[in-house]
Image (spheres, rainbow, N blue to C red):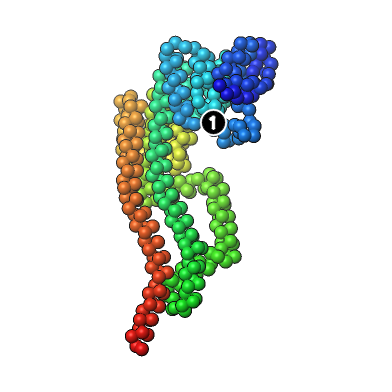
Amino acid sequence: MPTTSFDYKARDASGKVIKGHFDASDMKVVSASLRDKGLVPISIVPTSKLGGDLHIPGLTDRISIKAVSVMSRQFATMVDSGLTIVRAIGVLAEQTEDKALAVVLMAVRQDVEQGTALSAALAKHPKAFSPLYVAMVRAGEIGGNLDGVLLKLSTTIEKQVELRRTIKSAMSYPVVVLCVVVLIFFGMMIFIVPIFKKLFLQIKAPLPAPTLLLVDISNALLSIWAVVILACIVGCVVAFVKWAHTDSGKMTVDKVKLRLPVFGKLVHKSALARFTSTLSSLVTSGVPLVEALDIVADTAGNKVVERALRDCREGIRNGKPLAATLAQHSVMPSMVTHMIDTGEQTGALDALLEKVAEFYESEVAAMVDSLTSILEPLMIVFIGGMVGFIVISLYLPMFSFIKDMNNQAGGS
């Protein structure tokens, strides 16, 4: 079996951190060997070398949310079966296929072995475990229902992944088609139109307006001004992206997203689905409502919805009902506020929030299916129309030239 070189950090009996290299078939063998030597592994990662696995911070250490979901479900099963938390985390670290997650789990295990609470140990790794995850685990520790909370977490993460996939599928199709259209247009303007332009000069045929327009565009793209215009466009895009990452920029962009035709409703419903599903999970796990709203606001995915939730948090601190504070914001539909009001009055807030989340998740899925069925023929017609316009415009002078030649032959 081929071996791989691993870099490891481990702690000895005196608490001293030891670094070194180890050649083994996989990470499990390294971990077992270190423990046989009386060392507690802190981190084990493949050695970066040319031609081998390359470790790039922010890229190769990125942790898949799907891997966290699978890990949570397995963790819940182990805890429910009676395994200690330390042992369960060790097993998860050895069997997970996500190397970055394995490193994090080894560090979490080390902290838990030293007496740190599981939620506090997880909070040290925000790239792997979100505030939502940490808060629900903390509630599970306090309530003695850690296995149930972990199962709920796994389900919540899976729903978030599915919702994200659904939204991406709706947004990516028109973007991809638009990119294809732009490439076709520029390709024809740069490579095809100049060939016809030489032919037009040879036959000296009069050029109709559509053909003149294409020739002018082609000349502009092949001139130095094209570079200047492209540089300006790139500069504007970079400036816009930087501005869109500011607080005011995010708020403005998110407001525009909600007002977009067709896609605005999709963005709105997906934000409501995320908010109600997350809040339901937190309330079910026993997280206090004020703290839950703070976490939900951070994960809302839309600044307009986030601002509404933060206002609601302040209202609840002042003794107001959640439904009443939500009703003051136009971004919250009346169905959501009425369901929450019913949940507060009956003591079944978590269950009704879950029903609202399921409703909006189904609405988002239905909208994506509808958009896909509508956009596909529209995009095909758009591409065909653009290509057809270019081709006809290029051949119009040829038709005129042939017609003139026939008239001259008939007159003679």
* Residue on which the image places disc 1: 127
Answer with the quarter of the image where residue 293 lies: top left
Nearer to me, 335 or 102: 102
Relative side of 176 to 369, left or right: right
Which residue type does callout 1 highlight?
A: Lys
Residue 205 seen from this side: yes
Coordinates of residue 146 in the picture (x, y in percent): 44, 17
Residue at 40% across, 19% down: 148
Coordinates of residue 7 in the picture (x, y in percent): 64, 24
* Mark 1, other Cα within 10 Å: few <14 / some 14–19 / many ≥20: some
Q: Quadrant of the N terminus?
A: top right
**Residue 231, placed above or below residue 243:** below
Residue at 46% across, 23% down: 71
Residue at 46% across, 77% down: 203
Q: Report the number of discs.
A: 1
Nearer to me, 78 or 290: 78
Nearer to me, 387 or 282: 387
SS at circle 1 = loop
Residue 117 seen from this side: no
Give the residue furthest to the bottom: 412
**Residue 299, placed above or below residue 90:** below
Q: Quadrant of the C terminus?
A: bottom left
Residue at 45% across, 15% down: 79
**Residue 397, placed above or below residue 114:** below
Coordinates of residue 211 in the picture (x, y in percent): 43, 71
